Image (cartoon, rainbow, N blue to C red):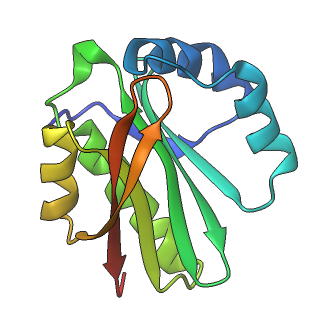
Amino acid sequence: MSDAILIRPMTAEDLDGVMTVEHDSFIVPWSRTAFEEELSKNNLAHYLVAVSDSEVVGYAGTWLVINEAHVTNVAVSRSRRREGIGRILMEKLMELARNNHMESMTLEVRVSNAAARNLYRQLGFEEAGMRKNYYAETKEDALILWREKL
């Protein structure tokens, strides 16, 4: 695990770095506009960035809806994976959800993403279903994962 990682709320000033991580991580990345709208117009959205030496090396987001937190995305720069940054981001999202009185957390993950599935299992998430052809660009299924009692 990296010692020099700062986790803090995402701001508009982070978006250049967030977009670099986004394009490094996803076949069909979110647009900059999507992130801008999440930050400025979506009162349910909460995003964090992982920063190392003033560089965004990861980010994660969640929507806090009534009593459930829905993880929207988690990404870490390819060059910084396997350092525990994804785990730190998820733990901070879970803390944020608890602090906002959320009772459970849910997310979707690609069936093929063994590393993420393993992390989520270690964090107490359990399979609750599947969304067929969820990822439009590849027609890949997504597992629906839940964690009760944050």
Q: In this view of the protein, which residue sits in the foreground, 108 or 95?
A: 108
- Is 106 situated left or right of 16 in this image? left
| Residue at the image position 21 percent from the left and 25 percent from the top | 81
Furthest toward the right, the residue is 41
Residue 74 position (above or below residue 65) = above
User: Residue 146's x, y, as percent?
Assistant: 34, 72
Rendered image quadrant of residue 91: bottom left
Where residue 35 appears, as percent x and y from the top left, is 70, 32
Q: Position of residue 120 (x, y in %)?
A: 22, 57
* Quadrant of the snapshot with the C terminus: bottom left
Count of picture labels: 0
Q: Quadrant of the N terminus?
A: top left
Give the answer, above or below, for where 13 lies relative to 75.
Answer: above
Residue at left offset 20%, top offset 72%: 124
- Above or below: residue 102 compared with residue 72: below
Give the quadrant of residue 53: top left
Q: Residue at x 43, y 67 (%)?
A: 106
The answer to which of 46 and 142 lies nearer the viewer is 142
Q: Residue at the location (34% across, 44% down)?
A: 141
Residue 95 in the image: state x and y as whole percent: 42, 69
Q: Seen in the image, is 48 located left or right of residue 91?
A: right
Looking at the image, residue 19 lies above or below residue 91: above
The answer to whether any part of residue 43 appears in the image is yes
Where, by quadrant of the figure, is residue 2 drawn? top left
Q: Is residue 54 visible?
A: no
Q: Nearer the viewer, residue 26 or 40?
A: 26
Q: Is residue 56 left or right of residue 30?
A: left
